[in-house]
Image (tube, rainbow, N blue to C red):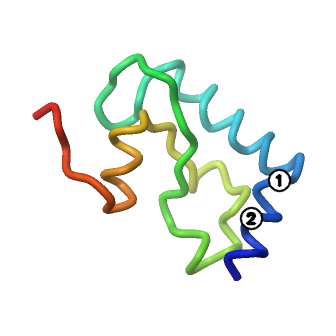
């Protein structure tokens, strides 16, 4: 499944989804509000439910710190 998801992330549809999620946030992280470079995050894991891969409602624009926290990989540093 991971190989399939990697392939999906290389599609034009995924690039469009990513761009739309980030543009919707108007340049600010949707968790902390900081004006940093943003990454598109899937709220519901696409590893568990691939149907939400291009769903804008399943997208959230996050700075790298908040993205790592959302994915459970790091604790919040700036609180």
State if disc 1 and disc 2 touch (CB < 8 Å). yes
x, y percentage for residue 63? 42, 33
* Alpha carbon separation for disc pair 2 and 1: 7 Å
Left or right, 11 with reference to 66: right
Look at 53% across and 19% down and name the residue there.
Answer: 26
Residue nearest the viewer, comparing 50 with 55: 50
- Give the residue drawn at x 73%, y 69%: 5
Q: Secondary structure at mark 1?
A: loop
Task: Please state the total of marks drawn on the protein image.
Answer: 2
The N terminus lies in which quarter of the figure? Answer: bottom right
Q: Which residue is mark 2?
A: 6
Determine the secondary structure under disc 2.
helix
Circle 2 Cα neighbour tier, 10 Å, few/some/many (<14 / 14–19 / ≥20):
few
Question: On residue 56, which mark appears?
Answer: none
Of the pair 8 and 73, the residue shown nearer to us: 73
* Residue 71, quarter of picture: bottom left
Q: Residue at x 70, y 35 (%)?
A: 20
8 over 64 or under it: above or below = below
In the rendered image, which quarter contains the C terminus? top left
User: Residue at point 87% right, 53% down?
Assistant: 11
For residue 37, side relative to residue 69 (left or right): right
Please name the residue that numbered disc 1 is placed on: 10
| Left or right: 72 as drawn, with respect to 54 | left
């Amino acid at each position: 499944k991971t190989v399939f998801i990697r392939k999906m992330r290389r599609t034009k549809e995924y690039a469009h989804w990513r761009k739309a999620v980030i543009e919707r946030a108007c340049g600010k992280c949707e968790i902390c509000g900081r004006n940093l470079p943003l990454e598109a995050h899937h709220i519901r894991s696409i590893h568990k439910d691939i149907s939400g891969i291009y769903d804008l409602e399943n997208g959230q624009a996050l700075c790298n710190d908040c993205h790592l926290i959302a994915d459970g990989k790091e604790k919040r540093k700036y609180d």
